[in-house]
């Protein structure tokens, strides 16, 4: 069989590539390679003239394969695949060679070495291109329904946007009520609007929306399937109260003799053994805490609607949806890991969310800041920033973004309550990045007199008698060591991923980034998409952000999943594992390696052979890498294609050395 006719197109990428790589020399080298019938360069191959050059060359020189030497295929490969398709060539006859990120960007000071490397990469690309195959596509129907995991402000907004378009939405949360972290807040910066004043109407609207089915106090047990046809198993935990009957009157809680710390108030307040987490909870349905309930039966006696059901069992719910949005939120950094600040040891060292519950008018202290040690009003409060953020020692080098504004807001609220109080903020840098945020920062200084000290405190020392705290910090602007005696210290705890983030990620088949949050497909161009078609992410599940950015991303996630549902079907690229049945020995190694349960076995000629599910398979290649016989191959990345690419580079290395 004759070798396919190959065309090579080298992109200058302005000076990004050509400033380091001699692109003309690479073109001349490529034109002499076996099978190459045409080679050319252009300043920007991704621009219309560059695309037209490729299309015209395909027709003029009857090209059967195309090699583009340019930047990262992660961004531009779809552009060039479309170009080939428009020229009448299979989009999978494209070989994209990265000579920017993998060459010019890493060899900026050695033009000769960079040019030689580009030649070698192109030579390998040409050899692989000769062996490329057309890849089939499979069309699947997309069910017009969505599961939204997490019912904080991100999940609620996504659910509302989709429901308003007529799509069926299942809104799931593991807590007793929807609302998430925002429901715990007192006010929101920079407008100082009451958080629940903004959130509560959305909570009620989403709960009453005809297209939304709210499932609370429930967790996901299993997710299988693919875009258009996800199958989800949910376990709804027993409340021991009939949700359809309970009126939320509170008579049961009034007679309950047991009081325990309220998790919603972070242990600062108490709740009964039968409870709702907060008065505006949605649904306003009581839950019995079986761990602390003493089975006295008083709640059952006073319940008018007879909603108490001590015999409730966990309920398994199975749903089928076309798309999924994950908006599972965040947790506060565990400040006990910063031992120098004494959190969990000193009574009067608290976190941002704890003071947030204090200054909330509906909170456990009626909106008043108090010292946990004696209940007195503190006259001097010190905020310490970046606790668990920008700190490689605890494994969190990232900025949590909202902590500076969080502290500014609470500092101003404290001054509003008591203008005579002294408030200090010890900071590394104040990052007031959003609309109206810098003005908010200036107001804290100029109008309220909040004192700012640039420096991260080294330690906190407690006076065992008074429970007062001495904060040791260097003011790096003044060059002075300060000892601030404080009545209360507030640690601006960073935002961290929830503990079950990895578990959810495994179920969905999506990635987790180095910070522990769910990883987006591309940080700039696809911030709400994931590598799994039909699965989007929103809010702090993707990384730290404030409420406006969370809402914006929630809307983006709703749009992302609405597109395939609106189209009604989706084309799945079949770069999937395939089995050579003549070679397969049925060793079952591939099945053990597959993270998607896409491999099963059948008997043929007296022995087992593997079979793959094209849809369930995600093309990760784990099976092909583990297969001892080579029977399992990945379309478009077959062994012969990869080996030929390596051989091409090694041969070119001899030629250019």
Image (tube, rainbow, N blue to C red):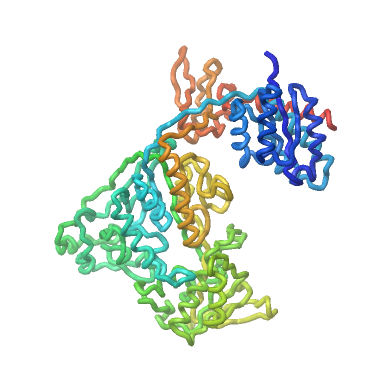
Residue 337, by quadrant, is: bottom right
State the count of labels: 0
Residue 63, by quadrant, is: top right
Is 133 displayed left or right of 126 in the figure?
A: left
Split into 4 quadrants, where in the image is the C terminus?
top right
Question: Which residue lies at the image location 50% right of the left edge and 31% below the top edge?
Answer: 592
Q: Is residue 637 visible?
A: no
Question: Which residue lies at the image location 70% right of the left edge and 18% below the top edge?
Answer: 3
Q: Nearer the viewer, residue 519 or 252?
A: 519
Q: Is residue 114 visible?
A: yes
Question: Which residue lies at the image location 45% right of the left edge and 41% below the top edge?
Answer: 534
Q: Is residue 557 above or below residue 463?
A: above
Q: Nearer the viewer, residue 554 or 152?
A: 554
Question: Which residue lies at the image location 32% right of the left edge and 65% below the top edge?
Answer: 278
Q: Is residue 583 above or below residue 115?
A: above
Is 471 displayed left or right of 416 in the figure?
A: right
In x, y percent, where is residue 265? 38, 68
Is 41 displayed left or right of 635 in the figure?
A: right
Split into 4 quadrants, where in the image is the N terminus?
top right
In x, y percent, where is residue 263? 37, 64
In x, y percent, where is residue 566? 41, 40
In x, y percent, where is residue 82? 59, 33
């Amino acid at each position: 069989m004759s070798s396919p006719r190959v065309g090579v197109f080298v992109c200058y990428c302005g000076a990004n590539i050509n400033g380091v790589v001699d692109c003309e020399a690479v073109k001349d080298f490529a034109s002499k390679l076996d099978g190459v019938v045409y080679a050319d360069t252009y300043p920007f191959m991704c621009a219309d003239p560059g695309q037209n050059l490729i299309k015209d060359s395909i027709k003029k020189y009857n090209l059967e394969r195309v090699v583009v030497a340019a930047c990262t295929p992660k961004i531009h490969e779809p552009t060039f695949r479309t170009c080939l398709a428009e020229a009448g060539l299979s989009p999978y006859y494209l070989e994209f060679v990265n000579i920017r990120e993998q060459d010019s960007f890493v060899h900026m000071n050695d033009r000769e070495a960079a040019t030689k490397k580009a030649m070698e990469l192109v030579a390998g690309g040409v050899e692989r291109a000769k062996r490329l195959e057309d890849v089939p596509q499979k069309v699947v129907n997309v069910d017009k329904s969505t599961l939204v995991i997490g019912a904080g402000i991100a999940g609620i907004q996504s659910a509302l946007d989709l429901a308003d378009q007529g799509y069926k939405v299942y809104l799931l949360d593991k807590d007793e009520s929807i609302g998430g972290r925002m429901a715990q807040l007192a006010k929101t910066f920079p407008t100082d609007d009451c958080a629940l004043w903004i959130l509560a109407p959305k909570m009620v609207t989403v709960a009453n929306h005809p297209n939304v089915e709210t499932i609370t106090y429930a967790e996901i047990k299993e997710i299988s399937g693919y875009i258009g046809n996800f199958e989800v198993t949910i376990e709804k935990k027993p409340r021991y109260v009939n949700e359809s009957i309970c009126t939320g009157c509170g008579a049961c809680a009034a007679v309950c003799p047991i009081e325990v710390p309220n998790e919603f108030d972070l242990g600062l307040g108490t709740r009964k053994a039968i409870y709702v987490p907060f008065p505006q909870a949605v649904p306003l349905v009581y839950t019995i805490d079986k761990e602390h309930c003493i089975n006295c039966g008083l709640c059952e006696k006073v319940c008018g609607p007879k909603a108490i059901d001590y015999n409730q069992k966990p309920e398994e719910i199975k749903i089928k949806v076309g798309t999924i949005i994950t908006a599972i939120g965040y947790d506060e950094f565990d400040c006990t890991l910063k031992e120098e600040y004494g959190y969990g040891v000193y009574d009067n060292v608290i976190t941002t969310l704890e003071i947030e519950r204090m200054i909330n008018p509906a909170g456990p202290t009626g909106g008043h800041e108090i010292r946990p040690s004696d209940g007195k009003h503190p006259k001097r409060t010190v905020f310490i920033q970046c606790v668990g953020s920008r700190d490689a020692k605890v494994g969190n080098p990232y900025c949590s973004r909202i902590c500076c504004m969080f502290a500014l807001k609470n500092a101003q609220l404290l001054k509003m309550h008591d203008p005579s109080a002294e408030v200090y903020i010890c900071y590394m840098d104040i990052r007031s990045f959003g609309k109206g945020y810098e003005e908010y920062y200036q107001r804290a200084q100029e109008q309220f007199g909040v004192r700012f000290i640039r420096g991260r405190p080294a330690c906190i020392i407690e006076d065992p008698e008074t429970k007062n705290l001495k904060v040791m910090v260097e003011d790096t602007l003044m060059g002075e060591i300060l000892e601030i005696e404080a009545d209360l210290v507030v640690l601006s705890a960073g935002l961290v991923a929830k503990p079950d983030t990895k578990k959810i990620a495994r179920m969905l088949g999506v990635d987790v980034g180095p910070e522990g949050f769910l990883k987006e497909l591309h940080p700039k161009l696809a911030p709400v998409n994931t590598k799994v078609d039909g699965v989007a992410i929103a809010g702090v599940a993707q990384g730290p952000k404030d409420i406006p950015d969370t809402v914006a991303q929630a809307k983006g996630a709703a749009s992302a999943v609405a597109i395939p549902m609106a189209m009604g079907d989706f084309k799945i690229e079949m770069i999937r594992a395939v089995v050579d049945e003549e070679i397969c020995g049925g060793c079952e190694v591939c099945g053990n390696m597959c993270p998607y349960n896409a491999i099963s076995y059948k008997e043929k000629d007296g022995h087992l052979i593997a079979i793959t599910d094209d849809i369930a398979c995600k093309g990760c290649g784990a099976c092909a890498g583990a297969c001892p016989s080579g029977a399992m191959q990945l379309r478009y990345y077959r062994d012969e294609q990869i080996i030929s690419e390596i051989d091409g580079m090694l041969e070119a290395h001899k030629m250019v050395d």
